[in-house]
């Protein structure tokens, strides 16, 4: 369960996200929607503690993490799949997944079987340098790395951006499985409304750093989509 | 002065000895540069006080050896840990507040170096001090073309040990993975539970400790002055700049520079060799500013 209460977040001295409140119950999937540049990525970065500063209150499973730096938030149960994947190119696939285990609560440094089972390509190429993987493979690695943290809440920033369609379906399927079978709470940003409708329980529209509208995905209608997504 | 006085003609055995002196020189420069390279490579901090950390290592050894009576071999790790502790304090107190302002770091560490020099001068006075070479290192190898003192041989061995140790920590331990993760992408490392600030503190302390150990050896090699650090820091910077990123770069560049210096000074003299070396480095950097080993090159 993730709660944000009146969060304002800054890059330098400029507030980018303003007075955002949201609540994602355990095991649900929230999709953050909005046009380019409205602050979707910054909202996820704020949750990870990667912006310069934030005010307001943020709770993970009832634990107040508002004042915690990034690495402690990761320890508290957040897994992060950032925009552009940002796998460590000089590390091997194995080392990248191993990096994820540093955020675990237990000190288990073994690569979880579930990661390898879900992404067989990675399992076969553990010693390959991550920089040599294709975009789709890097995205799978980024998800595997986040899963290795044993997260309760997984933040995904445009997980299907710039990836060929057959891999998109594959990634979509694995995310659904994480959410429905393993009960991991998902928060993702998305441009494709079809994917959002298919995967999420809740939606949230952003507009210029604020929450413009939110609700249950089944209540999402074309009028809202027209209002907040069309250019 | 005739050309003949200036130019020593080639003859095999003395030339081979010059190559061996080159190795000795390379090992000294490498030891001096190692801490600097680690700190620069990991944190992007150019530590102008590096020479003074070497100096502090030398004085630490002097204090423990002459005033307390600790044997030289024990002084080495002591110098490492004392200077590492000083480095840790410097990182916490000065460098940490300046990560987003690299130019200010340059200025701050330079100011720090002046403070350290004056402090040592106030405590120990300006006159030279000495670190005694232990008797078991007081031998000289004189076999055909090899002329090398025991201490210099010891320094070559220590260079190999320190480089191996550093390589092992960086590439074979979990701490090393943390350090390399922070090097590549600090935000991502933090997003996966790595405390980047702690990694920086430890790295700076380790780099400072290496400078301390270097100082212990250089103290035995030469006399101790409060401003002795400046004699080593130029070569240390040369090694780092020519080497580029990483341990391997520093090893290659120190070997190259040490040998070149030694060969040129065999044919001419020390001063002229230094002049040629500096010129070559400038020309080299004109064509390859990123150094021998650069960011984009593969390690595997």
Image: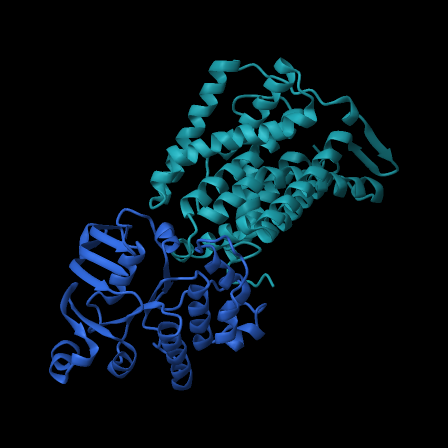
Chain colours: A blue, B cyan
The front one of A137 and B210 is A137
Identify the residue at image location x=77%, y=30%. Answer: B149
Is residue B27 shown left or right of residue B211? right
Q: Quadrant of residue B76?
A: top right
Q: Quadrant of residue B14?
A: top right
Residue A14 visible at all: yes
Tag count: 0
Q: What x and y, as percent, mark residue A35?
A: 20, 74
| Above-or-below relation of B57 to A202 | above
Residue most toward the right? B144
Is residue B79 shown left or right of residue B137? left
Residue A90 visible at all: no
Q: Please identify the quadrant where the C terminus of chain B is shown.
A: bottom right
Residue most toward the bottom? A166
| Above-or-below relation of B286 to A199 | above
The front one of B262 and B240 is B240
Q: What x and y, as percent, mark residue A38?
A: 19, 67
Is residue A71 shown left or right of residue B165? left
Identify the residue at image location x=64%, y=50%. Answer: B252
Identify the residue at image location x=65%, y=20%. Answer: B131
Q: What x and y, as percent, mark residue B59?
A: 57, 22
Identify the residue at image location x=45%, y=29%. Answer: B113
Q: What x and y, as percent, mark residue A52?
A: 27, 51
Q: Please identify the quadrant where the N terminus of chain B is shown.
A: top right
Is residue A121 shown left or right of residue A173? right
């Amino acid at each position: 369960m993730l709660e944000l209460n009146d969060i304002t977040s800054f890059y330098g001295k400029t507030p980018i996200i303003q007075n955002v409140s949201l609540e994602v119950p355990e095991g649900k999937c929230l999709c953050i929607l909005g046009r380019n540049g409205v602050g979707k990525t910054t909202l996820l970065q704020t949750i990870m503690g990667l912006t310069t500063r934030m005010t307001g209150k943020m709770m993970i499973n009832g634990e107040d993490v508002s004042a915690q730096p990034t690495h402690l938030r990761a320890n508290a149960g957040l897994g992060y799949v950032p925009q552009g994947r940002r796998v460590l190119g000089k590390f091997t696939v194995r080392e990248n997944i191993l990096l994820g285990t540093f955020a675990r609560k237990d000190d288990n440094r073994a690569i979880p079987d579930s990661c390898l089972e879900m992404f067989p390509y990675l399992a076969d190429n553990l010693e390959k340098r991550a920089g040599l993987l294709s975009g789709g493979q890097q995205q799978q690695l980024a998800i595997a790395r986040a899963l290795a943290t044993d997260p309760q809440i997984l933040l995904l920033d445009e997980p299907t951006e710039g990836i060929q369609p057959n891999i998109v379906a594959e990634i979509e399927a694995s995310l659904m499985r994480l959410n429905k079978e393993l009960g991991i709470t998902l928060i993702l940003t998305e441009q494709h409304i079809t994917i959002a409708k298919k995967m999420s329980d809740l939606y949230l529209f952003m507009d210029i750093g604020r929450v413009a509208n939110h609700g249950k995905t089944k209540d999402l209608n074309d009028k809202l989509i027209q209002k907040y997504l069309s250019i | 002065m005739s050309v003949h006085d200036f130019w020593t003609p080639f003859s095999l055995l003395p030339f081979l000895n010059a190559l061996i002196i080159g190795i000795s020189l390379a090992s000294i420069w490498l030891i001096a540069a190692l801490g600097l390279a680690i700190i620069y490579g990991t944190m992007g901090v150019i530590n102008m006080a590096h020479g003074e950390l070497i100096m502090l290592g030398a004085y630490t050894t002097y204090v423990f050896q002459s005033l307390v009576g600790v044997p030289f071999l024990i002084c080495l790790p002591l110098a490492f840990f004392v200077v590492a502790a000083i480095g840790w304090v410097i990182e916490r107190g000065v460098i940490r507040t300046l990560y987003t302002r690299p130019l200010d770091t340059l200025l701050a560490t330079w100011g720090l170096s002046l403070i350290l020099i004056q402090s040592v001068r106030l405590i120990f006075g300006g006159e030279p001090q000495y670190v005694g070479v232990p008797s078991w290192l007081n031998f000289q190898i004189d076999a055909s073309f090899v002329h090398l003192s025991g201490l210099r041989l010891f320094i070559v061995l220590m260079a190999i040990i320190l480089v191996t140790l550093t390589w092992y920590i960086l590439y074979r331990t979990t701490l090393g993975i943390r350090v390399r993760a922070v090097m590549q992408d600090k935000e991502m490392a933090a997003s996966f539970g790595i405390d980047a600030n702690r990694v920086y503190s430890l790295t700076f302390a380790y780099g400072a400790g290496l400078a301390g150990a270097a100082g212990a050896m250089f103290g035995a090699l030469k006399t101790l002055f409060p401003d002795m650090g400046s004699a080593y820091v130029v070569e240390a910077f040369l090694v780092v700049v020519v080497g580029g990123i990483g341990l391997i770069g520093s090893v290659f560049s120190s070997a190259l520079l040490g040998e070149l210096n030694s060969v040129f000074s065999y044919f001419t003299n020390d001063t002229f060799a230094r002049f040629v070396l500096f010129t070559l480095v400038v020309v080299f950097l004109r064509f390859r500013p990123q150094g021998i080993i650069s960011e984009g090159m593969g390690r595997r």
